[in-house]
Image (cartoon, rainbow, N blue to C red):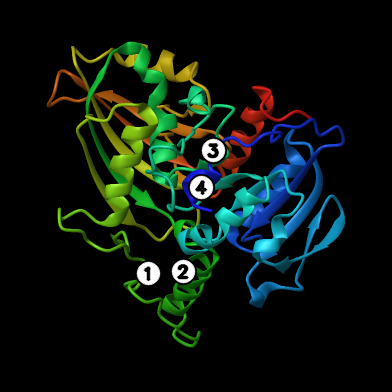
Amino acid sequence: MELTQLTQPVAGFTREVSQGLRVAVVGATGAVGGEFLSLFESRRLPVQSLRLLASERSVGKTMVFRDEAHTVELLSEAAFEGIDIAFFSAGATRSREFVPAALAAGARVIDNSSAFRMRADVPLVVPEVNPDALTESDRLLAVANCTAIILCVGIAGLRTLGRFSRLIVSTYQSASGGGAQMMHHLEEATRAYLDPTHPTPAPIPGLPEYAFNLFSHNTPILENGYNDEENKVIAETRKILGMDDLPISATCVRVPVLRAHSESVTLEFDGPAPSVEDVRAALDSAAGVTVVDDRALNLFPTPRLASHQNDVLVGRIRQDLSNPHAVQLFLCGDQLLKGAALNAVQIAELALEKGFITS
């Protein structure tokens, strides 16, 4: 059966789950996979049973959930039988290969990869920004690029102050965006840089020297001169905001930070820029945002402050001195949480809240 057919509603899919949800996590042993288990424990998603799936090299490992050890099983097409929701976080290739099987088994799929994000029939949901994009008939849902999620949450509350006419963003992206392997590489490369007797880690293909360095995001440069990450941020931000023609320029840079991405944003409006006071008030009431903006103490968002936080931190609120229509912001968000696992779990919670799944 074609994937297009599998994303359509199926009779009897929405069912009452009186004892909770039967959940599968694909890519359970990765950096994002571990965050799923923590979120299942700390939030309101009613997990009845949990199936952890990964590649052959991880089969047999154990992970603890609710004080009980769960054994990692092999990812296979048969592994989704009886599953209500399957969270995928194993990369686009794995998603393309196994999402059809999960859908065919009757599961609702929430996919963290880039495989389906820009398909017209697959919603790109950020619950604080576009909750209405989720409908009852949606069985396959995509989690947006982490940088786009953090950006959209940080600016969505400003839509009440006027229509956006242009967006410029420069990002400072952490190692967590490249997964557990890149985080470990950064740690070992830093040790080796500071201590010549420490073994130098094996290089990651396409990754320049990482310790005490920064470089253009390690994705291919495309024909338009932008790297793949920059193109994703542009396209996905437009889709999330529902502004297909919004002019956006993005520069994405990898920095030697373990987790949490940072972004410098210039946001232009159709009319005169709102005041700093109005911007701050709008952000104070925005869902998923914490304002960190103390000029006297030089206290603004940092990746250290944002790490392990659910909210996106927003500060450095100021009017653009070069453009009377623009304001400037600096924001930070935890890439593994709001940029990945948390957003996926929030999508499932939103489906429950809307009554598409009942427990």
Q: Position of residue 338 (x, y in %)?
A: 53, 40
> Image height check: is 73 above or below 344?
below
Graded by Cα atoms within 10 Å as few (under 14), some (14 to 19) or many (20 or more), the crowding at tag 3 reads some
* In front: label 1 or label 4: 1
Amino acid type for the residue under numbered disc 1: Tyr
Q: Nearer the viewer, residue 357 or 252?
A: 357
Which dot, 3 or 1, sits closer to the camera? 3
Q: Is residue 121 left or right of residue 88?
A: left
Q: Amino acid at mark 4?
A: Arg
Query: How many angstroms separate mark 2 from mark 3 (CA)?
Result: 43 Å
Q: Which residue is mark 1?
A: 210
The structure residue drawn at horizontal position 15% and vertical position 53%, both measured from the top left corner, is 224
Report x, y in % for residue 292. 46, 29
**In the picture, residue 298 is in which quadrant?**
top left
Tag 2 and tag 1, C-beta contact below 8 Å: yes
Query: Is label 3 in contact with label 1 (beta carbons under 8 Å)?
Result: no
Residue to which mark 3 is pinned: 8
Distance between the alpha carbons at the discs numbered 3 and 4: 42 Å
In the rendered structure, the answer to whether residue 155 lies left or right of residue 336 reads left
